[in-house]
Amino acid sequence: MFDPSQSYLARPTSKLSAIFEPKTVAVIGATEREGSVGRTVIQNLLEGSGQLTAHDLVQEVAQNLEHAKVTPKHTFEVFPVNPGKPFILGCPAYKSIADIPKHVDLVVIVTPASSVPDLIRDCGAKGVTAAVVISAGFKEMGAPGIALEKQLLAEAAKTGLKIVGPNCLGVMNPLHNLNATFAKRMALPGNIAFISQSGAMCTAALDWSFRERLGFSAFVSIGSMADVDWADLIDYLGHDPNTDSILMYMETIGDARRFLSAAKEVALNKPIIVIKAGRCEAAAKAAA
């Protein structure tokens, strides 16, 4: 049976390409503070891009790349954003997203939740295509967080900016050397796409994959699923020639009609395996 994902001519354009195959990535909230999420995210991205030059990190970088069996290919450029630092890990830092002299495909946000709607507005004004919002403190916090998430989505809708998250681990594309997460190691490259709402499940699956030497074409923590949802990712990965199958850990289904429509179409050519949590009352409360 012909698989349309194997034909680049048949592959539709998608804003999600900016998430999985960006040419330029900015990290808002990048820092050198040891143990912080901002430090881990910017270091992971700089390693993958080959830009990291700080001498005290060279040995650690070499060990991480040896583990993942990938070599930096300068497939994307990284821009740290921090108004209080001129340099982050040896790279020029910018005071705001507006100050970056190039178009930015993907922004990773690791700042407090209260700042995110305004940052998304700034990203829209800059013409940013997509954002991964790692920050927590949205609908999982109740009414104030729900209101904040609505503000975030309203700002994104003004320019059509796509958002993964919030409250997520981030996104990896090992075949692109992209690790836009705060996980310590890059997943191994392979042909399985993994998507999870649970950050803890992502971490557990990643640790297991290293022991089993199992690789991924994409590794996605979808978080609160405020914007980009199951259907969006299934559709994109269904057309990805590097993905042979899709594995999902699902807590809530979201828009069931869109999910089923996308899954039915893609499953004609690629297997989709869904592990559904929250089927009993106690588990459902834990997943909510």
Image: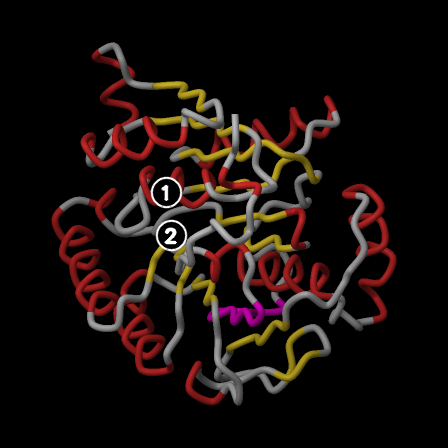
**106 relative to 188 in the view: left or right:** left
Residue at image point 70% right, 73% down = 89
The secondary element bearing badge 2 is classed as strand
The secondary element bearing badge 1 is classed as loop
Looking at the image, the residue that sits furthest to the top is: 280
Q: Quadrant of the C terminus?
A: top left
Q: Earlier in the sequence, mark 1 or mark 2?
A: 2
**88 relative to 278 in the view: left or right:** right
The kind of residue tagged 2 is Val
Q: Which residues are magenta?
A: 23-32
In this rendering, which labeled residue sits more in front, label 1 or label 2? Answer: 2
Residue at image point 34% right, 51% down = 166
Q: Quadrant of residue 280?
A: top left
Question: Disc 1 marks which residue?
Answer: 223
- Counting from the top left corner in percent of width and height, residue 178 is at 62, 55
- Counting from the top left corner in percent of width and height, residue 194 is at 51, 33
